[in-house]
Image (tube, rainbow, N blue to C red):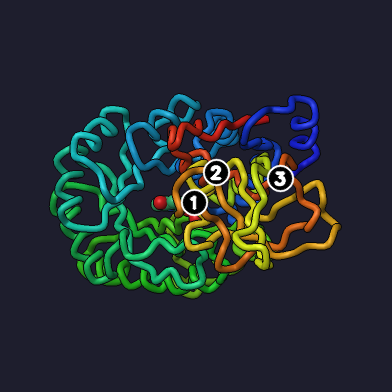
Amino acid sequence: MATQRILDFLATRRPSGPCLIVDLEVVRDNFNAFRRALPDSKIYYAVKANPAPEILRLLASMGSSFDTASVAEIEMAMDAGAPAERISYGNTIKKERDIARAFELGIRLFAVDCVEEVEKVARAAPGSRVFCRVLTDGAGAEWPLSRKFGCVPALAVDVLRQAKTLGLDAYGVSFHVGSQQTDLDAWDRALSDARQVFDALAAEGIMLRMVNMGGGFPTRYLRDVPAAEAYGEAIFGALSRHFGNRIPETIIEPGRGMVGNAGVIKSEVVLISKKADNDNVRWVYLDIGKFGGLAETMDEAIRYPLITPRDGDETAPCVLAGPTCDSADVMYEKTPYPLPVTLTIGDEVLIEGTGAYTTTYSSVAFNGFEPLRSYVI
Ligand SMILES: *Cc1c(COP(=O)(O)O)cnc(C)c1O
């Protein structure tokens, strides 16, 4: 959200062009809220949400661990001060030479979701701990992660058995309930699947020890979302229901929930026009769009709160679009966005809740627009 520190920064520094400003104090508060809400879980920040070095350094200094998806992300976490023991290679899709490089760097915790990937890890990172990702349906999530990652629980049993056979440490099960998940029961369904995998392998003498409960913790956009405590209670309840008094080690991997509300994008109205004299919907073009960092407006999935200097004036529905020459660069059209009728070309528009999945999604120079600049304060 637009904190006083962010507003002061914008007022004094007056950065030109679209940019993201991240307030580290909000990140610190979010980390503490997760720690309080789930005191027994280790926190692995999902680096892809926002890998700004200042954010990684702050979290490393607070004792966070890191979920990474590539060698480059592993190196970013290490440069920020995280030791290898606090880094997981959580991508289920890895080149064998990248696994080998991670192993060289000291990484010993890897995600898998099929036997083929287990074989790579066994060759390139012998003896490491592996966890197998199980599919979730993503119901209730505003940015579901579909069927790309994970396997059904029955297959996870085979995958982890094969890991053991190949000399790896069959450590546990992971899932991701879908990003921006506002249904507190989503973790319950996934933990029930995890328990099935634990039981099936225990019957063969393979004792799993860890459940990685992934990310999914939401940021407040236009609608209220449950607070971290509510997630903590729901998850602890589900763990107790499915694992009784033998709750395994647990990990959470917040990305959006750690940084989303810490960032605000400053943008500017480039053009306001109509397609016909009798159109009742205006087109408002900003100097940032889908290719400049607002990729999560795809299918109008994430609807960001906007602040304009004319808030309080009468509003009318607008189509909101970006500045590039690509017709896909339209953020909100199916559900137009109400904006003040007095909004004028040149007005500054603040886009809230943009601390996660913006800089990392911005293109390098599409149409000559530079990647989204960011200031971490
Ligand atoms: C992206 C990702 C996360 C973070 O998800 P959020 O919904 O942003 O919290 C966590 N774990 C894995 C494996 C991911 O790919």
Which residue is at 69% across, 42% downward?
26
Q: Which residue is mark 3?
A: 349
Question: From mark 3 to mark 2, how far is it between C-alphas?
Answer: 14 Å
Q: Residue furthest front?
A: 277
Q: Does the beta carbon at disc 1 come under 8 Å from ligand 1?
A: no
Q: Mark 3 belongs to which amino acid? A: Val
Helix, strand or loop at mark 3 = strand
Q: Which mark is residue 323?
A: 2
In-image side of 265 versus 371 (left or right): right
From what the image shows, is residue 312 above or below residue 71? Answer: below
From what the image shows, is residue 58 above or below residue 244? Answer: above
Q: Nearer the viewer, residue 283 or 88?
A: 283
Q: Nearer the viewer, residue 225 or 7?
A: 7
In-image side of 59 versus 318 (left or right): left
Q: Mark 2 belongs to which amino acid? A: Pro
- Does residue 236 appear in this view? no
Q: Which residue is mark 1?
A: 329
- Does residue 3 appear in this view? yes
Which residue is at 31% across, 54% downward?
131
